[in-house]
Every structure is written in C-alpha cells, then in structure tokens.
Image (tube, rainbow, N blue to C red):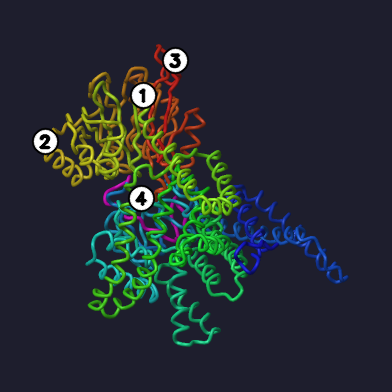
Amino acid sequence: MDVSVPGRPAAVDLRLLLPALTGWAVVAVALPLPARVVLAVLVGCAVLGAAGSVVLFRRRERGVLTVGRWFGLACAGAIVVAVLLGCAVVDAAVHRAGAVAELAEQRAVVEVTGTVDGDPRTISGRSARSAPLVIVPVGVSTLAGRGGMGASQARLLVFGDASWHALRRGSTVVFVGRLGPAQDPSSVEADVDPRGPPRILDEPGLADRIAEHVRGGLRNAAAGLPKDAAGLLPGLVLGDTSVADSSLNDDMKVTGLTHLAAVSGTNVTMVLHALWWCCGLCRVPRRWRVVVAGVGLVGFVVLVRPEPSVLRAAAMGLVGLVSLVSSRPRTAVPALATAIVVLLAYSPPLARSLGFALSVLATLGLLLWARPWADRLALWLPRRLAPLAPAITVPVAAQVMCLPILVTLQGGISWVSVPANIAAAPFVGPATIMGVVTAVVAAGVPAVAAVLVWGAGLPTMAVAGVARIGADVPGGALPWPGGAPGVVASILLVVALLTSGPWLLARSRARPGVAVAGVVLILAAVVPVRELAWPMVGWRIVACDVGQGDALVVRAGSDVVLVDTGPDPKLVDTCLRRLHVTRVAAVVLTHFHADHIDGLTGALAGREVGAVVTSWVAEPPADAQRVRETAERAGVAVRTVRAGDLLDFGDTAWRVWWPARRIDEGSVPNNSSIVVTVETPGLRALLLGDIEREAARALLVELQHGDAGPFDVVKVAHHGSANRLDSLYAYAGAAVAIISVGAGNDYGHPASSTLAVLRGLGARVFRTDESGDIAIRPAQEAESDQTPGRRLMEVACRGP
C-alpha cells in the first residue's frame, strides 16, 4: 500500500507499517491477560499466518501473481502478532520467575543479589516517601526469602537512603529489604524498601566505568554554567538528569519541551547526522559512512545507558537518519515498522508505554508530514524566510500526531508547545553537538572542556529561557475533556487538521486578514471564558494542581484554611491568586515531606496568615526545622497538633484523628501525617495526608470508635499509592474522591488498583493531573440533613 503525499516525488510505503501497528495493538491488549489466553491467540495467529503463506506460495508457483493485497497484509500481520506474543510470553516467564510477585504481595523481607541497572536518582525535594530518597533499579540474579532461594530475572526498584547514591551502574550488590507491589508494574516487578545500605560484591565493567567517567566529566564541566543550563545540559546531551532542576522540568512539561530534558530520538538523529556530515567532509566512501554511523550509535547508547527508553530513542533516531540521508526516502516508513517490531520483541512491556507511543507517533508524523508541509509553507512564506519552513513544520507534525496522547497526559491542549518547540529548535542542535564534544574532551582534558562547555551552555540557556517564558504565558493550555471522550475528540481534531489543513493554509494565504481575525476570535472565546468562570460560586474545597504534591484550600467563612502547600511556591501562590485569597486562617502541613511543605513561602507571600499547624512528629528533623525557620521569618506562629485536638476556623469545625502515636514501620513521616475531618455547611470531608497501610489500620479503629463516618469527600492518601487500606475507603463511603498527583510522575501514582477500588465503592474520582484545579460544593439538594456520603456534590475542574 502506497500513499502519495503532495510535495514529495515518491510515495510512502505503508505495507510493513500496518502489520507492525497490528502487532503492537494486540500485544498491548494481551499483556495483562492470563497466559492461556495469550497462548491461544498466539497459536491461532501462527496457524493463520502459516496457512496464508502457503496459499500465497502456491499461487505464485502457479504463476498467479495477482493476489489480494489485503490478504497478504493479513498474513503478515498474523505472523507479526504470533512472533510478538511469543516474545511476550517468554519475557513474562523469565522476568516473573522466582515468585517475586507473590512475595511482593506478602510484603516479604528478602535478601537480593543483583546488578545495578541504572544510575541512582536522588529525588529529595520531590519525594512522597522519604527525604532524601534515592531510587535505584536493580536486576535480580538470586533472591532468598520465606525459607526459599532461587534464581530470578526480575527487575526491582529500590527506594533507599543517601547511602545508595554512591552506587554505579553495573555494580553487583547484595542487600536485605522488604518487597512491595510495584507502583509501575510495566517496568519493574516489585518495589523494595531496603533495611540498610547495600554491600558491593563487584565493581562495574570497563564499558560502564568509561561511560561514567565521560558523564561525570560533562557534569563537572557544566557546573560552571548558570543553574538552568548546568542542570539541563547533561540531560539533553547524555540523558543524565541527576542534577536537573525540578522547577525547570515542570516548566518544560508545561511548554511541551520535556522531550529535551532527556535523550530522545531527535538527539540521536542529530548526533548521527553530524557523524554523517563529518564523514562527507573527510570524503569517506558512502558505504563506510554507515559503519561509522553504526559505531557512533553504539558508543552513544553506551554513554547514555542502554535502557529501554534509550534503545527506543536510538531506534527512532536511526529511522530519522534513514529519512534524512537515504537516496530512497520511501524506505523510511518500512524502517520505522521494522524498528517497532524489533523493539517490541526485545521488550514487550513497551507496548503499553506512553513514551514508546509518543516516540513512534512523533517519528511517523515527521516521515509523513514534515517535508510536504515544509514545501507548502515555503511557497506561502516570503522568499527570505522560506528556509525556516522545516524548523516550523517538524514540531508541528510531531505535535499533531502525538495530540491524542498528549491530551490524556496534560488534560488540555497546550497552544504554547508548538511556538515553544519552534523557538527552541535552532538551539537544540548546537547544544547537543557541542555537548557531546565537550563530554569527550572532558574525559581527557577537563580544563579545555570547562571552556568548550560554553559553546553548549549558551544554546542550552536559550532552551531553558524558552521554557521559563512559555510556562508563564496565561491560558497556555486550552481546556479539553478527559478520558475516552477527550481521546476520541482529539483524534477527530487530528483527522480534521490533516484533511483540511492544506485548504485552510491556501485560504489563509488568499485572505490573511480573515485568518488573523478568526484566530483572535477563537482565543477570545476560549481563554477568557475559562478564566472568568473560575472559581465556581459557592465552592467549599479546592484541590490545587501543584504537580506531584498536595495543596487543598478549604473555605472557612471569609478566610480559608490551606492544607499543605505542594512542592513549588509559584504554583500554590498562583492557585491562591486565582481564588482571590488574601487571608489564610491557618496553613496545615500534614507532614514534613518536600512535596507538602516546599511551597510554604509562596503561600505566605503577600498574605495575612494566622498560624502554621504541623504534626507533633518532627520527621525528617531537618525539614521540620526548615518549616519553623520559614514561619519565623514571616512572623507566623507554629502550632503542633495530635490526635484528639479540635480546631475552629470560621464556619468550619476540624478534628484531628492522627497521629496518635509514632509508627516506625514503613515511612515514618508519611505515617505521621495529620489526618483531619472537616465539617463545613452541607459537606463533611476526610483528609488523609500521606498515611500508608500501617497508620491507616490504626486510624480506621479510631474513626470507627468515634463513629466519625461516612463522609462526602475524601482526599485520597499518598497521591493514590497502592500502599493503602481498602477497608478505610469502604468505611469513609465518600461520594467524591480527590487525588492530588503530578502528571507523568516517577512513582506510578495513582495506582490502577487504587482507582479500581475507589470506583468500585461508587466514588467519583477526580485527579489534578487530568483535571487541574478541582472545586467542590454541596448541591442545593445537599443542604438538608441528608446522610453524609449520600449528599449530592457539584464538582468543577479548571483544567491544567
């Protein structure tokens, strides 16, 4: 099947792409199914593919060359599905061997011997579990627990303390820890809370040591750059996000530049293209350029780390290079199809990875639309600006193809992302190429690298500047429905753009005044309406979208009470400004983790605050001290509370139910969270902080003894973590459940099992990563003395 694209001399060959996409879709659906079902489908597809191949072969032997094209594609699709399902079955058997899943469900304590699978990442300041927290992926070789010992190929994610940060990829370690269900089961089989530091049995191999030396050299060279560039450059060039600035990462997510914060297919394409260009400059024969590019690709992957996301980027980058340098452009799409099949065969869980889907769709958009759109746009632009057409159409083509997935991640359509990508595009190439040169030089001559790094640092500063400016644009994300309706609507929008885009461009060129007026009218109709409609009249509770953290505003008469402040002062300040809050009766900090306290300065800025209320368990001590110092500088008193305390703010009554005692199991700070019930006119809410299963058991006893339930609204604990107590939510019986969580967070929050439990209990679930700010008020029917949990609640969402 060939598709002719206007502006291109050759047709696009889609014959291999359709079987590849079919195999991808089937594997994505089959992964969570029972093994017997997968095997049945595998056998069926294998039989159909083999039978169809025999028919095709016999017809060809008889000289019948005209075989239905769809029949051939169906046979190829059946064979691809069978192969990929076979790989999925083998992968599941290998990685789930050793009863890791069962031990994780039992939360068993085990001794693990394995190899460090990636670089340790410190997420202190963003953690919802401990401070500081170091995340280390470990590939298991042997696992001993519950009286047994055996080999395993499982992959674990360790949540350790600072002692784990010294580990290097490739090290063989042994440690003892408690297993738990994986927050992200698509990439690891279980999470581990270690019971102490690891013991190193063997150092990394030569390749890993060289890679770490080069990466460390780039980090050291970049340390002399301004903060944003110093944190972004190692990630942009080598995927090293260990020194990345969290606020810049948030701004890059808002502006659609997050793919630049780590190595993507774009970076790989640039490196390979630079190698190709250098070979041409040195007059290397064309056939040897492929060898040089291949060696360069392998070396680059080793430097960046051969993890699934990097291998995916390498494959997509290689496809991009084929499109750029091939004398037969129509080979690019078959190359993409081959890359899809090879990657899924290597790692079947990629079939359910949003990152993989974004990479494939973006690459497909570039191959199908970037060049023809650039040719058309060049005709429309003035002659001097015509060379800029590809820089405009490349990000547009990628964004258009990825739109259905982006709206599910962002909860809206960011009109800022396309201009931001266009503005950043000219700086990405120089930053990447000069960054690679600097990294190589830094490995041998650090003094020279300290000078060369500015050649990469200046364009990196420009990219960071685009992200900072774009994130501050008001109304940067247009509201869009969530869930399946939003995905369907976005697909229809993409189809409409692809089919009517040329006509709209032609009409815009003929009547530019009408086109400009139409754009202005659309923006005037969409952006201000949303701003004027917020906040909802009569709101009682608003969950602020502050990323991966908590910040709830409760109306208390003419004032408000703020429960937690999120991780970013700017985000909580912006939310309070939208609600026109100038006076805060109290700021209640449920516990001392950064994603609940780091926004405190933003909440205090320019507002009259009555008090800061904290838990009596001051863990971690350093963060508790930081809160006290921040409050003292602002002239605000700090008050500690414990279970049994009663608080009155305006027309609301608060009762503290936890912490009644210190629990040393699990996370001490999380299990020491303040848990309160809030009584407001027509609404009763249960705010659970970040308590885990251990504290939830004790809390449930207290609530039952005090006959506290049911409730109208529950703030779900710990961002929807799987570490929960189902019976607590059953007792709460809330009609509305709020989950405060950041889009694309590293913890897998909220867990799919938690969502299933809440919905199974009949709760309407709202998430800040999908809905943005969430406002709740009692419906008029709820003003009577109806039983809490049965009263009608009205919910309005502002959109991220």
The answer to which image quadrant residue 566 occupies is top left
Q: Do callouts 2 and 1 mark residues in contact (Cβ within 8 Å)?
A: no
The answer, for residue 152, to whether it is visible in the render is no
On the image, numbered disc 1 is attached to which residue?
A: 537
N-terminal of the pair, mark 4 or mark 2, is 4
- The residue type indicated by label 2 comes to Gly
Q: Position of residue 727 (x, y in %)?
A: 44, 30
| Gap in angstroms between the C-alphas marked 3 and 2 | 43 Å
Element on which disc 3 rests: helix
Relative horizontal placement of residue 586, taking residue 341 as reference (left or right): left
Residue 306 sits above or below residue 644 on the image: below
On the image, numbered disc 2 is attached to which residue?
A: 635
Residues in magenta, as a range: 128-149
Q: Position of residue 160 (x, y in %)?
A: 32, 54
- The residue type indicated by label 3 comes to Glu
N-terminal of the pair, mark 3 or mark 2, is 2
Task: Look at the image and tell me in which quarter the C terminus lies.
Answer: top left
Element on which disc 4 rests: strand
Numbered tag placed on residue 193 in the rendering: 4
| Gap in angstroms between the C-alphas marked 3 and 4 | 47 Å
Element on which disc 2 rests: loop
On the image, numbered disc 3 is attached to which residue?
A: 781
- The residue type indicated by label 1 comes to Val
Could you classify mark 1 by the number of other residues whose Cα lies within 10 Å: few (under 14), some (14-19), or many (20 or more)? few
- The residue type indicated by label 4 comes to Asp
Relative horizontal placement of residue 262, taking residue 457 as reference (left or right): right
Could you classify mark 3 by the number of other residues whose Cα lies within 10 Å: few (under 14), some (14-19), or many (20 or more)? few
Residue 340 sits above or below residue 178 on the image: below
Q: Do callouts 3 and 4 mark residues in contact (Cβ within 8 Å)?
A: no
